Amino acid sequence: METVDSARLASNLLTLPTLLGVSLCALVFAIIRSYVSWNARSRGLPLPPGPRPLPLVGSLLNWPKSPQWVAFRDMCAKYGDVLYFDLLGTPTIILGSPSAMLELLDKRAANTSSRSTGPMLLLTGMETNFGSMPYGSCWRLHKRVFWQEFHPGAVRLHLPAQRKASRMFLGKLLKSPSKLRKHVRFTFFAAILKAILGVDVAGDDEALLDVVEAALEWRGEALLPGKYLVSAIPILQYVPPWFPGATVQRLSVYWRSTVARLKEECHRCVEKSNGEDCAGSRMIARMEAEKRPAELAEEVIKNVLHTAIEAGSDTASQMFSTLQSFFLAMSLYPEVQRRAQAELEAVVGTTRLPDFDDIGSLVYVSALIREVLRWHNVAPLGAPHMTVEDAEFRGYFIPAGTNVFPNVACMHDPDIYADPDVFRPERFIHDGKLDFSTAPDPAMFIFGFGRRICPGRYFAENGLFINVAAVLHVFDITPPVDENGRVIKIEPQLTYGSIWCLSCGLSLYYQAPIGTSGGADPRSAIV
Ligand code: HEM
């Protein structure tokens, strides 16, 4: 009897309206709970402003496609210099002014130095590039191993490699100036490989170059925020490659294999260098001296080396794009080029090529390089940092796990740089000295911020200097001319990955060396 009553009671309770009622109560309870917990976390502070998010998809449809830095600049003009987006649950902010960038990414670096480890990182095999690692002991170990070879004192050891690569670059330009893109790639590639692996890239050692290129060619596109749906819906990463439409999973197999091959190649080269003085062998010696377990040491060194190659020689890297922008600027601004050449002739003379000791005396050339970095900033959205704790910033709530992008479009803000689209190195010179009092040093922004600031910057500055100074000293860079000798107007085109780079349809013509007023021809130093 008792059993029948219980069953009847249960069936009465499980009627549809009861079920709906219970579900509704659960939903209301969940909403209230999440509201209360959000309020406790945010302490009632609002999120930063931004385009109005839509239900379910958040700000996904407001996230601009291309060029993002311009779109974000316009949005900042409307909403202020801290913009908020909800990318399917991932909080994302864009910082639109130097003060906001320095305040959040430099001064609050303890909270803003991590990286998001989204599914694309694993799919691309980039999780072993320490530039992508979240902040923590693993990143610190990699960064330390890298920094021991790239801090301002250590980069002096790499000067011979950079000098030699730049001389070879000049030789290649003399022989085949129309292959500019290839030669630009060569100079950074040769310098970094010699510096870290002890490898001499004689002539066109395409084999190693191919391994590097294969590992790098897809990166700009693949890592573009919002490019693949899987970044927004991480569960999609588990779809098997054979599943219809699983393009990214099929690409992933290829991407990962190219990175793995590059790492193996780095390891093989360092082993082959057989203790020769290069960064790789010094890293091994240090790890041995610290008595690190062999397996860990090998993995860390491979990761650091492939990170350095990617950052230092990738065709989509900042070095590559910056040097190309230099050629473009010189062909468009002949008066700037003449002024730099006059300075080189006065300081260096006509019997030798410029060298690193000349940096301090070549004020105009140094300002010119700063202007290239500003004029065509090649990574206007920098690299996103991720916050690790909830924070308050300028009266707004920034949740833990927010991706923070600095929009370095401020390099083209007329309030910061007068006539920002004009190439004018003079903006950085006062009383014959480099002076950033009226126009901030672009290096403050373009190398990133806080603890994640580019650790390769000193090596980068040396590499840019030696190549730019040597090219200016030996060549005249002019726009191309047609068969009737008429100047062809260069229309620079920019391709957009996570990094801007000049798509090099542009070919430049080189004139006789300028060093003609007596003495030995500086070309004798070109190899
Ligand atoms: C013009 C040249 C270069 C520019 C403008 C540049 C800029 C940058 C930027 C913006 C970042 C991200 C910083 C941040 O997250 O705040 C970065 C990171 C990095 N760069 Fe560079 N870079 C250049 C050249 C190089 C070179 C030549 C190397 C290596 C030899 C290098 C190695 C790295 C590494 C390892 C990171 C990751 C740092 C980390 O996340 O801890 N960079 N760089």
Image (spheres, helix red, strand yellow):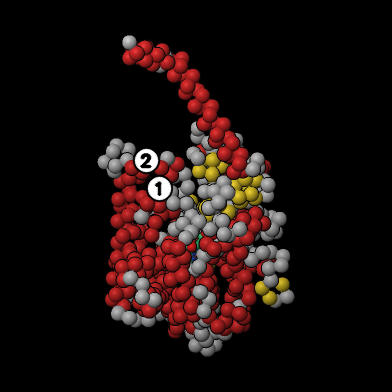
Which residue, given by chain and number where applicable, does mark 2 sit on? 236
How far apart, in angstroms, are the residues tagged by discs 1 and 2? Answer: 9 Å
Q: Residue furthest bottom?
A: 519
Question: In this rendering, is residue 71 above or below 457?
Answer: above
Evaluate whether residue 388 shows in this view: yes
The front one of 445 and 398 is 398
For the point 47% across and 23% down, which residue is it?
Answer: 23
Q: Which mark is drawn over residue 168?
A: none
Q: Position of residue 347 (x, y in %)?
A: 60, 83
Residue 471 relative to residue 99: left or right: left
Which residue, given by chain and number where applicable, does mark 1 sit on? 119
Q: Secondary structure at mark 1?
A: helix
- Which quadrant of the view contains residue 191? bottom left
Residue 361 relative to residue 437: left or right: left
Question: In this rendering, is residue 354 above or below 47?
Answer: below
Amino acid under label 1? Answer: Pro
Crowd rating for badge 1 (residues with CA inside 10 Å; few <14, some 14–19, many 20+): some
Picture mark count? 2
Q: Position of residue 211 (x, y in %)?
A: 32, 63
